Image (cartoon, rainbow, N blue to C red):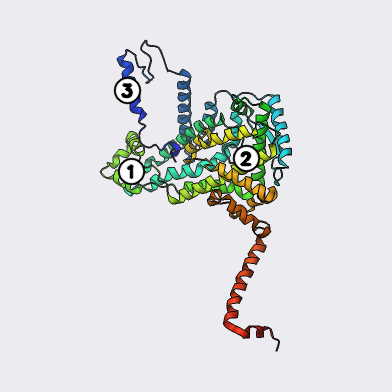
Amino acid sequence: MTDLPFGFNGPSDPGDEGDDDEARRRREQGGSQDPFGFFTGAGGDAAGFDAAQLGQMLSQFGQMLSGMGGSMASGQQGGAVDYKLAARTAHTTIAGNPVLTEEQTQAVTESVRLAELWLDGATALPTGVTVTEVWTAGQWVDHTIDTWKRLCDPVAERMGSMWVEAMPEEMRQFAGPMMGMLTSMSGAAYGTQLGQALGQLAREVLTSTDIGLPLGKVGTAALLPTAITEFGEGLELPRAEVMLFFAAREAAHHRLFHHVPWLASGLFDAVETYARGISIDISAIEEAARGLDPSALTDPSALQDLLGGGVFQPQETPAQRQALERLELLLALVEGWVETVVRTALGDRIPAAEALVETLRRRRAGGGPAEQTFATLVGLELRPRRLREAAALWSQITEAVGSERRDRVWDHPDLLPGAEDLDNPAGFVDRLLDDGTSDLDDPIGSIEKLMREQGESGSGDGDVDSGDDAPDTDDPQ
């Protein structure tokens, strides 16, 4: 976990000192510095100055103050995250929101229809798509913001409350009058950061399930044709094949999430479990509190120094690591299954499929924009680290038992492969092939068989002890 969520900063960036050296060098060369801290070149030119970026920054800052001021003026205490502000900031961050053409809409619709037809022969799970839509980056923000609430609320609420809970009673008394204001400020700050991150992600995301989670509505297959076109640039692959590949991935995800009802909740629960485990080092707070003048808490700058000094930096717990491992395993299994099914469905029909699979693998393994954004938003890396092993496991299962029995592995979370099975896929396949049947075919029968075996083992011991008297128990006389 390299990124701290919602602006809880660690030690200062070493690059800050380098920036001071650069400023000093420019001044020595005769360059000037404008009043707002943007350096100009030696000849007074505005080298490196981006007026558009400055305007965007000021606009976002104004939105944050406006949202905070509205909450305070209404007298209502906002939530842990100001999601209205987040949505506005995200739309501001998205530079240009092109209008989708009828040609793009038709291409997406036809691609999903054809992909569904081919997927029927690759998986026993029926279609999970009821509606096909095309989204712009802005529409992606609007359609997924409710899901981001579920993902971000547990983390934001915990981060916003844990440092207050850990405060010594004396500090709470002095800080009490400021709590309402701090809540509004933190909600606005979180909303701004969320909006900036979503705006960045919206320019990169390709489908509604691109990060491995069902962010959109159930049954709605959504593709972002503008982003898909940009993704395909430079790959020297036919645009139609690239679109069909992502349509197949989107449709496969929806089949899995629709027909495995526990899966989506299992992924979200892992995130919530991680959030609930967020904690801070109380001893560090107590150490920082020693010698601190409580009246300094009324000074916003002093409070900022306290919050930004790393004292309230969250500590990862064993429960969080376990939740993270569970989440990463589930993500790897989902992405591995989708990759296997899409490969089977496309087969030789789409020559570019293999190249696209490998490109996506490298993108996810290296931590693409989706993974980086999620790390900023939720505080953990949403990365299927063992995607390659999971895909190999699903491929071996398919070859050994076929797609129908492979897909029945999803019937219950306890039937899924574990992390150790990714290391030894043959062992998991052997268990499926044991005695020509498997627990997946008749789980109740397997339990009854186990009970009979245990009963026979117990009766056998009794026979040894009872000797020749055992048969007489059935004698009616």
Residue where numbered disc 2 is placed: 339
Residue where numbered disc 1 is placed: 174
- Choose the circle earlier in sequence order: 2 or 1: 1
Vertical position of residue 52 compared to residue 367: above or below: above
Residue at the farthest top position: 43
* Callouts 1 and 3 close, C-beta under 8 Å: no
Nearest to viewer (mark 2 / mark 1) = 2
Q: Give x and y (percent) for residue 167.
A: 35, 47
Residue where numbered disc 3 is placed: 21
Q: Amino acid at mark 2?
A: Glu
Q: Amino acid at mark 1?
A: Phe
Residue pictured at 45% horizontal, 18% vertical: 50
State which quarter of the image contains the N terminus. Answer: top left
- Choose the circle earlier in sequence order: 3 or 2: 3
Residue pictured at 35% horizontal, 17% vertical: 33
Q: Amino acid at mark 3?
A: Asp
Vertical position of residue 36 compared to residue 474: above or below: above
Q: Residues within 10 Å of mark 3 (few under 14, many from 20)?
A: few
